[in-house]
Amino acid sequence: MSLIADRYELLDALGHGGMASVHVARDRVLDRRVAMKLLRSDIGRDPVLRERFLREARLSAGLAHSHIVRVYDAGVDGDTPWIAMELVDGPSLREEMSRLGTFPADRAVAVIVEVLEGLAAAHRTGVIHRDVKPANVLLTGTEGGDGPAPEAKLGDFGIAKSMQGGGADLTQTNQFMGTPKYIAPEVAIGMPASVRSDLYSAAVVLWEMLAGEPPFDHPNPLTLAMMHRTDPVPPLGERRADLPPGLVQVLEQALAKEPEDRPADATTMADLLRAGLAGDPVPAATPPAATAPTQALPTAPPPPPVPVQREQTVAMPRPAAPPAGPSRQASAATASRPDRGGWGIAVVVALLLGLAVVAFTLSGSDGVPSDGASPSPTTTPTP
């Protein structure tokens, strides 16, 4: 038996990862069982990794919600940082997905709605999870029986980031944090994680629960991450024809490549999922953004999206030089008429008539561009 911080007795091992292990432990002071997460001692000597681990405890300790795994205590024992957490009596969502393959639509939505409720609570306190995936969702029991349905609890805020700017970001330059199979497109190319990045990851988990496999997969982690940015999401309706169209529509919104095209927040996404599952009309996830790049373009007729505008710019013809055909010859002949008819008439009235003809001829040439200039180029915003 091992004792941590002269208080927690380590009992059974629950799991091991590349950086930490999780054990069942008994809290001698409060006489209760807890989940004890221990950072490997060799990793615990690394100041950056050690700080990241302890930051998880600090961020999680401020989150009190029924769908977030509660953190009770944290500290360092020798070279081993540790976190004492709520012990959830049930499997991870990853284990349940391996057992079931695919989920009924109502059960899958119920789980993700609870995850979204936990995310909403975290986001309200200024914390972005950044690693929403099935292994980080714990279920309080399994399906079946007469008791209440299992509840989902979101845990492992190990790479979470505070939006309050109170601490340094431990992500190095040119790195992204997250699991490639569930990473948001903007994070994959180095943009900061946001509330809507968490929503994208939750949508990928739901897609996998319904389809039995993730929308993107590849053995190379970098290639897999970039697939989220560049590849269209496979049509879920073709894999699960029994799904309500509104539910598929909400998932497509949540898996949009651009963050602004996704639901505005976790609560909105949960409401949309419920509506889509029930077959209710699903409104647009977000109103048109006033600051979108295309808003600066003319609005009448309706402004095309940026890619279409780029095509229009390329396709705009350069005005051609005036043709050398009959029309130009006619203009030249007309312009010479005053010279042929003016000198043979000596009276003043005839001279005035000749000047009128010249004025008429010059006014008739306005249909040909006078300077031959091409239209000024239109700058297309870079997407």
Image (spheres, grey):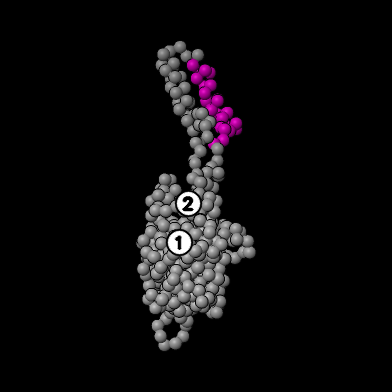
- Residue drawn 49% across the image and 53% down it: 191
Please indicate, yes or no, whether residue 24 appears anywhere in the rendered image: yes
- Residue drawn 48% across the image and 51% down it: 305
> Which region shows up in magenta?
319-342
Q: Nearer the viewer, residue 383 or 123?
A: 123
Please indicate, yes or no, whether residue 210 appears anywhere in the rendered image: no
Identify whether 337 is placed above or below 49.
Answer: above
- The residue under label 2 is which amino acid type? Pro
**Which residue was labeled with disc 1?**
54
Give SS at disc 2: loop
The quarter of the picture where residue 15 lies is bottom right
- The residue under label 1 is which amino acid type? Leu
Give SS at disc 1: helix
What distance separates the C-alpha of mark 1 from that of mark 2?
A: 45 Å
**Which residue was labeled with disc 2?**
305
Q: Earlier in the sequence, mark 1 or mark 2?
A: 1
Q: Is residue 323 magenta?
A: yes
Q: Are marks 1 and 2 in contact (CB under 8 Å)?
A: no
Identify whether 93 is placed above or below 185.
Answer: below
Horizontal and vertical percent position of residue 231: 57, 60
Q: Badge 1: few (under 14), some or many (20 or more) residues near its Cα, within 10 Å?
A: some
The quarter of the picture where residue 211 lies is bottom right
